[in-house]
Image (cartoon, grey):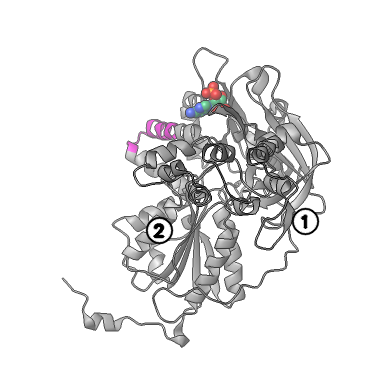
Amino acid sequence: VSVPGASEAAEVQFPSEQTISKEVTILYGSQTGNAQGVAETGGKMLEGRGFQVNVLSMNDFKPNQIKKIQNLLIVVSTHGEGDPPDNALSFHEFLHGKRAPKLEELRFSVLSLGDSSYEHFCQTGKEFDQALEELGGTRLYPRVDCDLDYDEPAAEWFEGVLGGLNEPQRGNAAPSQATVPQTGETEYSRTNPFHAEILETINLNGRGSNKETTHLELSLEESGLTFEPGDSLGIYPENDPSLVELLLEEMNWDPEEIVTVNKQGDVRSLKEALISSFEITVLTKPLLEKAAHLSENKELRELLSPGSEERLKEYLEGRDLLDLLRDFGPWGVSPQEFISILRKMPARLYSIASSLSANPDEVHLTIGALRYESHGRERKGVCSILCAERLQPGDTLPVFIQHNQNFKLPKNPDTPIIMVGPGTGIAPFRSFLQEREEMGAEGKSWLFFGDQHFVSDFLYQTEWQKWLKNGVLTKMDVAFSRDTSEKIYVQHRMLEHSKELFEWLQEGAVFYVCGDEKKMAHDVHSTLLEIIEKEGNMSREKAEDYLAGMQQQKRYQRDVY
Ligand code: 2AM
């Protein structure tokens, strides 16, 4: 047994001023493309500062190469119940498993993306940070956990990292004072959205449907924006003006009072600010903590005290800012003080439903309207209801393209594809087939679609029929769950065709799933395993390896929400 003693320690080389490695590896784990975007933007910044930067998706990185790396940056998001994104799974497992090497030479830092309205906020980032520390790595800058509004903290983290990279001593570097030059924003982006004109809005559902699905067409003319099938469109929506009215009445505030809405000092009327600049429909623990400083109310303090975690969780569920204001007054606070504790209006991402080659200068979306009742009040999805109820052709929306490398058509047009997309999950597959038609692709394709009723909910029905007829689509199976006494879902259709489905997989088909994460994607995953197990005569463990292998080869891709 070798005990690390003085002699060994002395062998560790501390990089001197001259030997600071200029090589930086940035690994991202990203489901929707946010972390990927941050990694790429930050990577460019570091390159501009003279570093040799390699930006990679975690599943494009050979884990045992980590021993050769000196400077590692991790940008990773968290999903569902604190889960890593699909493309981070294998690397995450590797670092937490027996094969993980000692990493005493490694300098690292972690940026985690998350949403503070979820219990397991930034969990995956925290786990990477801890694992790298336990393996012996040294932080070149402390981990930063970002909420939905991640642009600024991410830029600050990269600045801090830059300081750490330039620091020859190991150990936690102090934040760098150097400011990152603001890149001239000539291009449209997340932080500089394009105002896209609405060309058309159509309700895709027929009479008698329980659903309202908006087909939205926007113009990208003169934006210079381009996208590929599988990418998403980000939209900055507006809050419901009638909800804002209620807030203003509750607080007895003047809608026309002028307030400052950001660090840059932009001003607008309070009413406008509440409509377009801030999130008012979601409560988070950090928000309540800040609000507790603005109210004398004892009950709010109690709710936040140790031991009340369960009650707090229950309170946050399904309530909004109006509930908070009503429940915990009186508020001796100015509008300016109050809005400064709110989260910035977050962008909503929608999978793009059209192909640029089929519809130049346009982008189409498929948006399901969200309405529900909670705590005695009707609640509405911010962006989906804006699109369903208030948008007219000629209006504009601030938008940006979110590239997503995790959901892409195979490069080879001959590769077979299997697509599972119930409900609005159908969106990217309309884009896929439009693109394959334009390309004259010859590969087989198979679509599974499901919704409640055949008559009212068969989204884009005539388009699939056209593609079945002209051969762009080879096979289609549908599952209408509420037309029969027993529910039939897409995964039941998959099982009915398990033999053929497995044959397609064996031929190298790429399997895509888009739509609801919690139930549908989970059940489709289990069904896929069941099919592989049965048709491939494999044990459960072998089937899991088979599916993990597919994931590694990017032949199992998910766009789930
Ligand atoms: P349901 O509403 O009748 O339960 C699109 O929303 C379709 O997905 C609907 O037909 C819906 O059925 C169905 N769906 C609901 N839960 C599902 C699950 N766990 N797996 C697959 N489809 C599901």
- Side of 478 where 83 appears, left or right: left
Q: Around disc 2, counting alpha carbons within 10 Å, would you say few (fewer than 14), some (14 to 19), or many (20 or more)? A: many
User: Which of the 4 image quadrants contains residue 442?
Assistant: top right
Please report the residue visible at 61 percent of the width from the left and 72 percent of the height from the top.
Answer: 180
154 shown above or below 333: below
Whole-percent x and y of residue 250? 63, 38
Whole-percent x and y of residue 46? 57, 72
Residue with the most extreme top position: 485
Q: Is residue 531 magenta?
A: yes
The residue under label 2 is: 128
For the record, the magenta segment spans 526-540
Q: Secondary structure at mark 1?
A: loop
User: Which of the 4 image quadrants contains residue 560?
Assistant: top right
Q: Earlier in the sequence, mark 1 or mark 2?
A: 2
| Quadrant location, the C terminus | top right
The residue under label 1 is: 224
Please report the residue visible at 70 percent of the width from the left and 62 percent of the height from the top.
Answer: 265
64 shown above or below 434: below
Can residue 156 be seen here? The reply is: yes
The kind of residue tagged 2 is Phe
Whole-percent x and y of residue 548? 42, 45
Can residue 430 be seen here? The reply is: no
Whole-percent x and y of residue 420? 56, 34
Q: Which numbered mark, 1 or 2, is in the foreground of this view?
A: 2
